[in-house]
Image (cartoon, rainbow, N blue to C red):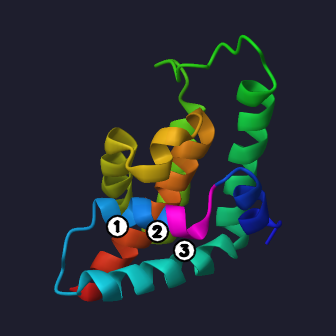
Amino acid sequence: MFEIEQRLQDRGITLDAIVAAGMALYVSHGMSEADATAELYKKIQKYLGDPNVSSLLLGAILLEDELYNKRENSEIKDDPVFLLSDEIIGMAIAECIGGTYARFEFTRYDQKKPGILAELGPFLDDAIAGLIAGCTSRLYSECI
């Protein structure tokens, strides 16, 4: 939906990189790491096609381009503490997919920034963290 997967790939954000970041903080819930990786890949692909998730991701892409990438001396270059909209987008994506539990999972990914998350700007790191958190939270809930 909205060519989100292609738009992310154009920015160097591949499905493999998203799944790898997700698995970096994986906590086993009785599912092998190989099975969890396969399931996480399926969930991420599924939710990239969800119109609510993909529209929030599109918003993050456009905001990052406009407010971060296109501005030589961007006011948000270092992701200042007063910038909250990026966190709100990430939490919205996480909760849209995984409910309230996903908000706590989002915090883990937002703070540690594993893999590709450490390479992204202020909007996309939180949006992708929200995608991962929602999908991992759902994965954990289904394992119990």
Give the mark nearer the N terminus: 3 vs 2: 2
Residue at 61% over, 19% down: 77
Q: Are marks 3 and 2 in contact (CB under 8 Å)?
A: yes
Q: Position of residue 79 (x, y in %)?
A: 53, 24
Closer to the camera in the image, 143 or 101: 143
Q: Position of residue 4 (x, y in %)?
A: 75, 64
Label 1 element class: helix
Q: Position of residue 42 (x, y in %)?
A: 52, 84
The residue type indicated by label 1 comes to Met
Closer to the camera in the image, 138 or 21: 21
Dot 3 corresponds to which residue? Answer: 44
In reply to whether residue 85 is colored magenta, the answer given is: no
When the figure is inspected, residue 57 is found, relative to residue 99, above or below; the finding is above
- Judged by its main secondary structure, the magenta piece is helix
Indicate left or right for 4 with 83 as reference: right
Please say whether residue 101 is visible from this viewpoint. no
**Callout 3 environment at 10 Å: few (<14), some (14 to 19), or many (20+)?**
many
Label 2 element class: helix
Dot 1 corresponds to which residue? Answer: 23
User: Which of the labelled discs sits on residue 19, or is there none?
Assistant: 2
Q: Which residues are magenta?
A: 13-17
Q: Quadrant of the image for the N terminus?
A: bottom right
